Amino acid sequence: MVDLKKGAAAAVAADEPGAVPDHEWELFNTPAPLINMASRGLMRLAERRLKPFGASAGQLPVFYLLRDGGAMSQRDLARLARIEQPSMAQTLARMERDGLIRRVPDPKDGRSSLISLTKKALTKAPALREALHAGRAELVEGFSEAEIATLCDLLRRLNRNLDRGVIREIAE
């Protein structure tokens, strides 16, 4: 029996069945767990900063995509935001309930509607943007401009790789 106080290293040393070597659990030395932790942390911060304005981080893609006063279908919003249709439908339902979006029939497709931000949402958008930008400096504190540019480049490349992987999986 493995002593739980000694952890995984004891299990490996004892050659217990099902033991996982420490090197297979290097959570802080591989990209995926680190990116996941950073993403969760960013979402928590965004939620805290947006809550006083009656908005949430999940609504940001809609605010961004419709920021110029334009209108889009739910399908286009979901595709451009890279989220699933049901998630977008839930987000839009909450935003509609809160008076942040309006729907009008799509003149090109009677089965669909076009979604746009209400005046209330457009008025709120600059404050949301400012709340998010306020913490930007502390987010990259200690990073040089070159490091920030490199990080952004690496994350864009990572997202392109992920997009290709998803497309491959869908095709299979």
Image: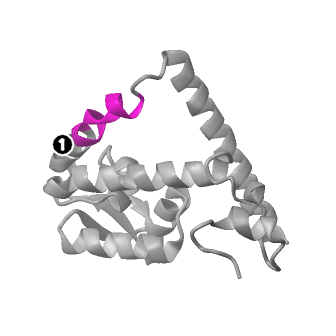
Residue 87's x, y, as percent? Answer: 45, 73
Residue 151's x, y, as percent? Answer: 58, 31
133 or 88: nearer the viewer = 133
Q: Is residue 118 magenta?
A: no
The magenta region covers 130-140
* Magenta residues, dominant SS class: helix
Q: Quadrant of the C terminus?
A: bottom right
Q: Which residue type does callout 1 highlight?
A: Ala
Establish if 89 lies above or below 116. below
128 or 105: nearer the viewer = 128
Query: At 35% across and 53% down in the image, what residue appears?
Result: 60
Q: Quadrant of the N terminus?
A: bottom right
Tag 1's secondary structure? helix
79 or 115: nearer the viewer = 79
Residue 83's x, y, as percent? Answer: 52, 64
Tell whether 47 sits left or right of 17: left
Query: At 82% across and 69% down in the image, what residue appears?
Result: 171
Q: Hey, which quadrant is residue 142 in on the image?
A: top left
Residue 33: in sight, yes or no? yes
Q: Is residue 133 magenta?
A: yes
Establish if 155 lies above or below 120. above
Tell whether 12 sits left or right of 72: right
Tell whether 108 sits left or right of 104: right
Q: How is the image coloured?
A: one colour
Query: At 68% across and 39% down in the image, what residue appears?
Result: 157
Residue 27's x, y, as percent? Answer: 63, 54
Query: At 63% across and 74% down in the image, what residue appears?
Result: 3
Q: Hey, which quadrant is residue 140 in on the image?
A: top left
Label 1 sits on residue? 127
